[in-house]
Amino acid sequence: MSKLLDFMRELGRNASLAAEYTQDADAVMRRAGLSDEERTAMLEKDYATIKRLSGLSDGQFATNHIITAYDR
């Protein structure tokens, strides 16, 4: 599994990480060890590149919104 996909999954299930990401997305992604290309794709919301880098295929990457799995 790709580091980017692992990061996106953790971002969706970890409220603390999501709050940090909202404040300083690049710092959180650097700390997670994402590459320059991965960070740029996420910051620019370049879904085609995110899909390619994460290994997701059509139908698996169906939203451009953060879906959270935790209570606020």
Image (cartoon, grey):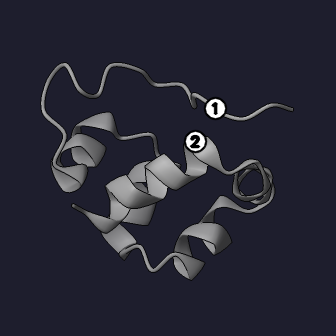
Say which residue appears at 39% left-offset and 58% top-offset. Answer: 6
Mark 1 element type:
loop
Point 66% across, 73% down: residue: 27
Which residue occupies the foreground of this view, 46 or 66?
Answer: 66
Please name the residue shown 16% across and 49% down the image.
55
Front residue of this view, candidates 55 and 69: 69
Q: Position of residue 42 (x, y in %)?
A: 45, 51
Give how far across and how far down residue 10 sits, in percent. 53, 54
Examine the image and state in which quarter residue 65 appears.
top right
* Mark 1 in CB contact with mark 2 (< 8 angstroms): yes
Left or right: where 17 falls relative to 12:
right
Q: For this view, does 71 lie left or right of residue 17?
A: right
Image-based side of 9 in relation to 30, left or right: left
- Which kind of residue does numbered mark 1 sit on? Thr
Q: Secondary structure at mark 2?
A: helix
Picture quadrant where residue 24 is located: bottom right
Q: Which residue is mark 2?
A: 12
Instruction: Between residue 25 and residue 3, name the one nearer to us.
Output: 3
| Residue 62 position in % (x across, y down) | 32, 19
